[in-house]
Amino acid sequence: MTGWRILPMGEAAVLAECMLDDVAAANAQALALACALQLGFDILPAIRSVLVRFDPLLWTVDEVAAHIRQQIDQLVPTAQADGQTVVVPVRYGGEHGPDLDDAAQSLGLSAEALVMQHTAQAWRVLMIGFAPGFPYIGPLPASLTLSRRATPRPTVPAGSVAIAAGFTGIYPARLPGGWHLIGRTDLTLFDPMRQLPTLLQAGDRVQFVAV
Amino acid sequence: MLRVVAPGVLCTVQDLGRSGYQRFGVPVGGAMDRVACAIANRLVGNLPTAACVEITGGGAVFEVVEPCVVAVTGADLGATLNGQPLPMWLSVYLTAGRRVAFEGRRSGARAYLALAGGVDAPLVLGSRSTYLPGGFGGLGGRGLQMDDVLRPVPGQAPRDLIRLAGCAWPVAVDYALLIRILPFHDPSDLRSADLTAHPWRVGASSNRIGLRLEGPPIQTSQSREVISFGVFPGVIQLPPDGQPILLMADAQPTGGYPVVAVVIQADLHRAAQALPGDELRFAWTTIAEATQAWRELQRLLALPVEEDDGTALAAASRG
């Protein structure tokens, strides 16, 4: 077991973090570990980590950490099955993507080139986090990596497609947000009344298409 | 059955929340003070999963529309029944026309009102809890409003109400704002010792998502962006301004701020009873002590309820 850091997080949780520099590889490992861990734990995969919560009257931190290490040792690197590929139609720029021009300029690209790169390949859904149904998609190449806006917006329209910190994401609802808004989609990303409440799951692939 | 006459500062329907849905970005949610919520349910004979009304601050008034049995636990918000003090931590039979009012805060922040049969609301992702930022759960995803009606879950309303009344909780719940924490070792070299050096004031923007703690900023040797990882109620984050955030029930399931410490699960209900302006203190503990505290709390929650000596009936007839 190399390349992992296992830390107790209080008396009832353990965080296992994959320390590989390659975010895509670390994410594949984290998702594979989340699948391998046994039932009875509350398991939350994130971009490069897995949070395991448990009842401290049934398990000790050491037992859970040992169980995680055992599963990591047995991980098959290619075990992670690809999820579905979801096509996301996006209206780029203008009122739908008010930051497209500024983001392109900061990246030393034309707006068209940014859109072309954003739609050039299917990206991986690395995790759902931040808000119900919000997908962290990527990792984006260095040519599309921008830090967050200096001042977050108090509200961002639902469906906004954004980039920041080497990821691209889609705001499922009207939310505050600090990412650069480059477009908007009409797809519903989160519906709490559905049995499966999110359009996307970690492990899926997303193909953005300009419309 | 109760009708909301006035919602006061904030009333929401809450149960134990949505464990298992965090991979969809959904917070655990549910009652901030899960201990008081659980005891309120016990007192009226409900299952632990039943929904209660979480009453924050004073001003809430309810009118009894149909006879029911209720119990109030948690913060002392000056509960009255037709103007007379309503005993807390006790199940009480209420006849139609009575009024239950929460006059104002005496101590704590959140009271829980359990209704025999459980407060009815549609199940959303396995829970009746209100998630205000997402606008779902509870009654229409919002706080209670005037003229909302709180009914027991159909088929769950007990037939023999009088028999349920007069159950008292045998021991007091400790609400001291002294919160035990465990360190979280993050290599970003945070001097987390600063957390216990002085009390922290609960900031004005604190809510069900988290308590924003104000005090001398905690120094970090470096400010670095952390790749978001799973967090949960009790986690203490440190944003770049050095003012810690204690995540509470409605916290997002992932966070990108460095984590400095984690509140032990057995003390989280105490933090839930702090309102803006209150001061709380942290003390370091060990995993062994934290586990023992959790074991004791579970033992406390499993105590049998006591038959009351008649206070309940006296209160109900006086009101």
Image: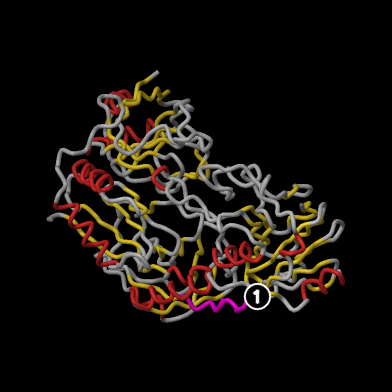
Q: Main secondary structure of the magenta part?
A: loop
The chain carrying label 1 is B
**According to the image, label 1 marks what residue?**
B306
Identified at 42% across, 40% down, the residue is: A134
Between B220 and B35, which is closer to the camera in this rendering?
A: B35
Residue B262 in percent (x, y) is at: 39, 67
Identify whether A168 is placed above or below A92: below
Identified at 62% across, 58% down, the residue is: B46
The amino acid pointed to by label 1 is Glu
Quadrant for the C terminus of chain B in the image: bottom right
Compared across the picture, whether A154 is left or right of B162 comes to left
Compared across the picture, whether A99 is left or right of A77 comes to right
In the rendered image, the residue lying farthest to the bottom is B197
Between A72 and B25, which is closer to the camera in this rendering?
A: A72
Q: Is residue B173 magenta?
A: yes
Residue B210 in percent (x, y) is at: 50, 60
Identify whether B11 is placed above or below B175: above
Identified at 17% across, 50% down, the residue is: A20
In the rendered image, the residue lying farthest to the top is A211
Tag count: 1
Instruction: Look at the image and give the residue range highlighted in magenta.
Output: B170-179
Judged from the image, the secondary structure of the residue bearing numbered disc 1 is: strand
Residue B279 in percent (x, y) is at: 55, 76
Q: Is residue B318 magenta?
A: no
Between B90 and B81, which is closer to the camera in this rendering?
A: B90
